[in-house]
Amino acid sequence: MSIVVRDVHAHELDSILELNNAAGPSILPLDAARLRHLHDTAEYFRVAERDGGMVGFLIGFGAGSGHDSSNFRWFESHYPDFFYIDRVVVASRRRGGGVGRAFYADVQSYSEVRHPLLTCEVFLEHDNDPVRLFHGSFGFREVGQHVMPGTDIRASMLVKDLCSYAWVRETYGGALPDEPWLGRPRVPARTTEETKA
C-alpha cells in the first residue's frame, strides 16, 4: 500500500513518544514534556501512515527559529540559512520499505523553496553505517563533527545543497505563490511567556 505523509495531530503525541523511545540508541529518548515542546515549536512536524497505521515521524526547524538543540546551534554557528531535521523515526518493522525516502522527499520539497541547505546529524557511536549510507545516497555530505554536551555522543554533521533554492529566491523573493502543493509552515503554539506579554 502507499505511504501517506501528513501533518501531525496533537492526539497522536503518545503514539509518537512510544515510537521515538522504541527506536534504539540512534535516537535520543524523549519525555512527554519535551515532545510537547517540540510539537508546539516545530515548523515541520509530519507523520507517515502505511496500511492505516502510523509508521514514523519527522520534526524540523528553519534557521532563526531559536530551537534549543545543541546540534541546531552548531549549524547556526556555521551557516546563515538552513533547514534542520531534528529527528526522523521509522518503526523498526517498516525500515527499508520506503518510509524514510518518502519523508526525505517531502521535507526536501518543503525546504528547497525556503532554504539553501538541508541539515541533520547522524550519531557515530552506534552501528549507523546503514543510516550514513542512506543519507549519502540522498546527497548529504559531512561538514564536521560535534560532541553533544551532557551525552558525550559524537555526531556527524551533514548538509545537502538544495539547488532549487537560488532560482526560487531570485524569481519569487520571500513571497512564494499561493499554491497548495507548496505547503505552509506550521504555526507553532505560542509559549506561555509570549501569551503573558
Image (cartoon, rainbow, N blue to C red):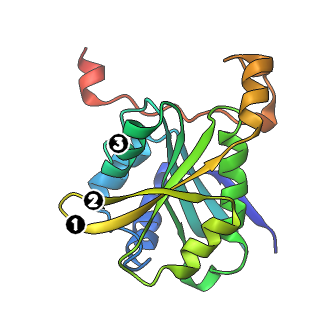
Q: Is 73 on the left or on the right of 45, as rendered?
A: left
Q: Quadrant of residue 177?
A: top right
Classify mark 2: helix, strand or loop.
strand
Q: Is residue 11 above or below residue 154?
A: above
Classify mark 3: helix, strand or loop.
helix
Q: Is residue 55 above or below residue 48?
A: below
Q: Which numbered disc, 2 or 3, marks the residue that appears first in the sequence?
A: 3
Please state, as top left, top right, bottom left or bottom right, where the N terminus lies in the image.
Answer: bottom right
Q: Which of the numbered marks, if any, corresponds to residue 41? A: none
Asked if the residue under mark 3 is in contact with the one under mark 2, i.e. CB atoms within 8 Å, the reply is no
Q: Quadrant of residue 136?
A: bottom right
Residue type of the residue flagged with mark 2: Met
Residue type of the residue flagged with mark 3: Arg
Q: Is 123 on the left or on the right of 135, as rendered?
A: left
Say which residue label 1 marks. Answer: 151
Whole-angstrom CA distance, mark 1 to mark 3, is 16 Å
Please state, as top left, top right, bottom left or bottom right, where the C terminus lies in the image.
Answer: top left
Q: Is residue 52 visible?
A: no
Give percent across and percent down for residue 194: 29, 21
Q: Is 9 on the left or on the right of 153, as rendered?
A: right
Foreground residue among 19 and 82: 82
Classify mark 1: helix, strand or loop.
loop
Name which residue lies at 61% across and 66% down.
135
Foreground residue among 194 and 130: 130
Residue type of the residue flagged with mark 1: Thr
Asked if the residue under mark 2 is in contact with the one under mark 1, i.e. CB atoms within 8 Å, the reply is yes
Give percent across and percent down for residue 35: 36, 54
Name which residue lies at 80% across and 38% down.
181
Give percent across and percent down for residue 134: 63, 72
Say which residue label 3 marks. Answer: 73
Q: Which residue occupies the extreme left position in the image?
A: 150
Say which residue label 2 marks. Answer: 148
